[in-house]
Image: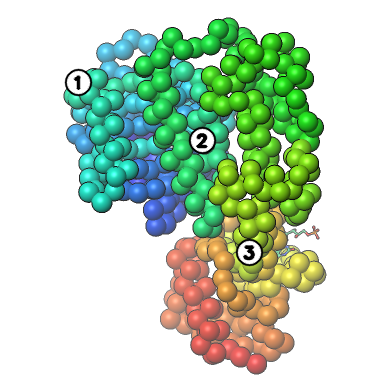
Amino acid sequence: MLDLKEKNPLEMLRQFAVNLNGDLLEDLGAAKLSLNNGNGKGYISLYEVFPGLTAWIYNIEFTRDYTIDLNFSKNRLFYFGYHLSGYQMTKFPNEGMAKKIGERQNFILSGEPDSKAQFKIPGKIRFESCFLIIEPNKLDNRRSNTKTQLKAHLSEIFGEANAKQSYRYFGNIDFRTGFYTERIVKNKRTDLVGRLLVESAILGMLASQIAAHDHDIDTESLQPDLTKEELSGIALMGDYIKENIGEKLPVKELSRRTGLSPKKLQSGVRFLYGHSINKYTANIRLERARELFNETDMNVSQICYKVGYTSRSFFSKQFQDRYGVLPSDYRNTLRKDNLLYEISYRSMAKPDVDGETVGDILMTSKSNNNSLDITGSLIYHRNVFFQLIEGPRRDVLELYEKIKKDSRHFDVQTIWKGSKPSRDFTEWDMAMISDEGVLTIPHDGNTQELGLGHLMGDIGQQSLESKNLWRKVRNVLKTSFENGDISD
Ligand SMILES: Cc1cc2nc3c(=O)[nH]c(=O)nc-3n(C[C@H](O)[C@H](O)[C@H](O)COP(=O)(O)O)c2cc1C
């Protein structure tokens, strides 16, 4: 159970990190809490679009039910939420029964200052969800019309309720918001394009939720003449389309599959997604195309035909309309993404690891890394490994996943990861630190010694485990090469 004080999102994430004993990595405007322990597996991350608007993203499976008692602050925050998978039980003060907020349902919450609400996320099921947290007191910005309008709209919505009371809105099932939420929760790219796509999806999600809220309040009677079963049949049609993405998928065929007349089907799709069947199918095709660009090396033409387009120019135009970039440019940014990438980590060797085992690791590494064009250095010192691997991004990430699963070590902690302009090592090598604190590095066929005395001086096993020490070792390694201290 977490007794959470409502503060700014980063401070709240820090309270989660302490309570769950997870790893919190902070960056400018973003933070990620990774969890891989008895409490659960996955991550919770934050992403600030501008001061006052932050996305809080769950992609996690808790080991058991996780209860959060949220103590609302005087600075009223607003939470616009949407669960892609999994659900949450919510109980506000003076309510006997907890309410379920289910999958793909829009909701907006805000608590009465100094009151408390309880949220329970069930254990053992994947919880993929996004909350947009709005801090109205940070939205004061005369130079931004969007922020001023957002603030005005919020006070309009919440003016409905007494400003001092809690506000809860549990909306309809809304698939349109799901399109945006999916892009936020499933994003894996950390480069500029990734950030832009996530930011646009966050704004899209907010717009979609505000529109859905206003729509629900104003036009309850506009619901089409379809039963719940018929609507959920239409929702399932998405799976059929995904499985047959390369086919033509005419409305007649979809109508036959769902057992609904084309007219009913058309109005149901319009109600759920806000556009025609053809546009809905096109969106799924384009989404799949984007996934294929991210996950495969297929070229633009191959992807175009694979997702069911027959004309490359039409595909390019639709892709650009949806994502703002031509497919060929998108492909190129991903190729760039394959440029030089580094991961450094430190890990603890299992007690039975000896010189022979280290020799085995080195032999495998030498031959595998050579063929992958991965270079770097492995340090083994008093049962601690430190490794720096550099090479094509995708290969480095794949190798790291493999290394992390190796049973000869444990507690693998990332020290640094990211792109870089040039290699620090020209070949794959093993470095050793002697007890005097001298790092011996084979470099371009010669053995070089690096004095780490000031860092390694009188360290014990305890500080050898510290990530900070290895961060410093990495810096010494890198600066030594840059300064030309080590050269041929
Ligand atoms: C500390 C440590 C570092 C390792 N470094 C590498 C490496 O740089 N390259 C590599 O291919 N395997 C490395 N391994 C071994 C991998 O975990 C894995 O056993 C190996 O890649 C399997 O190779 P194979 O598929 O050719 O059998 C490392 C293992 C440990 C424990």
Considering the numbered disc 2 on the image, is that residue within a helix, a strand or a loop? helix
Return the x and y of residue 23 as percentages of the image width and height: 47, 50
Residue 246: tell me if it is visible. Answer: yes
Ligand 1 in which quarter: bottom right
Mark 1 or 2, nearer chain start: 1
What mark, if any, has residue 339 been given in the picture?
Answer: none
Residue at the disc numbered 2:
181
Front residue (pair 49, 272): 272
Marks 1/2: CA–CA distance: 30 Å
Q: Is residue 193 left or right of residue 3?
A: right
Which tag, 3 or 1, sits closer to the chain's start? 1
Q: Which residue is mark 1?
A: 162
Residue type, label 2: Thr
Task: Identify the residue at image location x=67%, y=75%.
Answer: 430
Q: Marks 3 and 1, how far apart in space?
A: 52 Å
| Mark 3 lies on residue | 336
| Side (left or right) of 481 relative to 81 | right
Q: Quadrant of the N terminus?
A: top left
Q: Is residue 349 visible?
A: no
- The answer to whether 82 is drawn above or below residue 302 in the figure is above
x and y percentages locating residue 187 in the rendered image: 56, 45
Query: Looking at the image, which residue is at 26% across and 51% down?
Result: 143
The residue drawn where x is 54% and y is 58% is 191
Question: Which element carries disc 1, helix, strand or loop?
Answer: loop
| Few, some or many residues within 10 Å of mark 1 (<14, 14–19, 20+) | few
Q: Earlier in the sequence, mark 2 or mark 3?
A: 2
Which SS class for mark 3?
helix
Q: Quadrant of residue 419?
A: bottom right
